[in-house]
Image (cartoon, grey):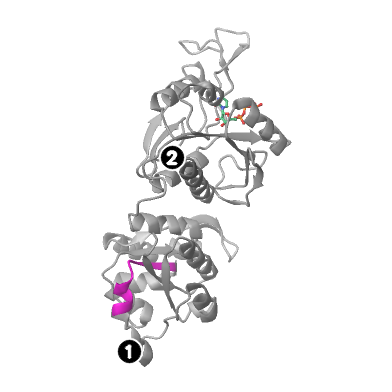
Amino acid sequence: MRGKTVLLIIGGGIAAYKALELVRRLAERGVRTRAILTKAGAEFVTPLSVSALTGEKIYSDLFSLTDEAEMGHIQLSRSADLVVVAPATADLMAKMANGLANDLASTSLLATDKPVLMAPAMNVRMWESASVKRNREILEKDGVLFAGPNDGEMACGEFGPGRMAEPLEIVAAIERALAIEGPLAGFKALVTAGPTREPVDPVRFLANHSSGKQGYAIADALARAGAETTLISGPVDLTAPQGVKLQRVTTAREMLAACEAALPADVLVMAAAVADWRPDFAANSKIKKSTDRVVPLIKLVENPDILATIAQSAQRPRLLIGFAAETDDVVPNAVAKRARKGADWIIANDVSGDVMGGDRNRIHLISEAGTEDWPDMTKSEVGIQLAARIAKTLKGAA
Ligand code: CTP
């Protein structure tokens, strides 16, 4: 990323304030941002705040003589490595899809010879309207890249797709668009996700509410950061993240065998909600209510503890990260779990609410150094921040 230049077009929408954080995040990564602030965008953020963060003058007027003398729209759009539109309004999408060019933002989009990444933000009904859908299809066919939008509550109070992707998610999409070698290039990562299913008979099983979303987001972030990533997943309704080797398993014992076969790795993140017990006996044919009149008693036996087993093995990764799904005394229980299982870090989360299956998470990172309380964020953001921490730790130890 360092040394690259992004031309950021800030459209008019409430989400424009997030564009300011995007500039900061890019600056942290050594990326220079030049910004075009549309007239509508300037209703939401001031040119002064944008230029204070970019450290450059703001471009806004197509017909400004000084701007044209210094850098016209053609040069502006081509001197960057990537053009990012955030927030991408329905208007900006329509202009680019149809080749309209009546202001600096739209002429720059038309004139650029660089990839364009859009982070749409609009009301859910607008996003789902036939014309926005059509424009998006045209833009995708033209090779425009998209980050988001996310599902969620919007400033207008409605709920659904249309919320702009979070700044860190846009940064990850920028990294991918620029195909930059990430900080974890050369490292091997193993991630587990989802529940395990423990069969009772051919049609019944014991399982839990894990959706796999957090584990998949972590695998996605690790792969985007350049790690060679294997994801071992219990049964979930998610597709494999790009660039991740996915292996599906069903039971805890299968998950353990798959982990052992995938080692060695530099880091293992055990995000799976592994069933602690399984029926001691899985019937080969369906247990019938009609013939077996007595209510069956299911006797449970303990499953192997995958994390603890790997912590003790010769193949122990350099960084072993477990999760702690807790409903009570979250941090004290997780601190004890870290010691008991022999993990380096434990990511503790309170699963008494709607974390399991939801899109957001509030975690506590427990390590030898103590406990860090992370703010509430999307599972995708947790993945990105965690991948950055893993990179820092592995590189420090390399
Ligand atoms: N885990 C594991 N194998 C198991 C059970 C759990 O590897 N058989 C891992 C999980 O993937 C997670 C960590 O251990 O990374 C903690 O899981 P959790 O369900 O919170 O803890 P339990 O071991 O089940 O402990 P308790 O039931 O006391 O909360």
Q: Which residue is drawn at 37% across and 81% down?
A: 104
Amino acid identity at mark 2: Leu
Which is more toward the observer, 51 or 274? 51
- What range of the chain is rendered magenta? 75-86
Amino acid identity at mark 1: Ala
Which is more toward the observer, 208 or 71? 71
Quadrant location, ligand no. 1: top right
**Label 2: how many Cα within 10 Å (few below 14, some 14–19, many 20+):** few
Residue 21, x across and y down, in percent: 53, 65
Q: Which image quadrant is residue 3 in?
A: bottom left
Q: Do the residues labelled 2 and 1 touch (CB within 8 Å)?
A: no
Residue 275, x across and y down, in percent: 56, 24
Which is more toward the observer, 32 or 125? 32
Task: Determine the secondary structure under disc 1.
Answer: helix
Q: Which residue is drawn at 49% across and 21% down?
A: 313
Which residue matches tag 1? 69
Q: Earlier in the sequence, mark 2 or mark 1?
A: 1
**Label 1: how many Cα within 10 Å (few below 14, some 14–19, many 20+):** few
Task: Determine the secondary structure under disc 2.
Answer: loop
Which residue matches tag 2? 238
Disc 2/disc 1 C-alpha distance (Å) = 51 Å
Extreme residue toward the bottom, this view: 65
Q: Which residue is drawn at 37% across and 68% down?
A: 5
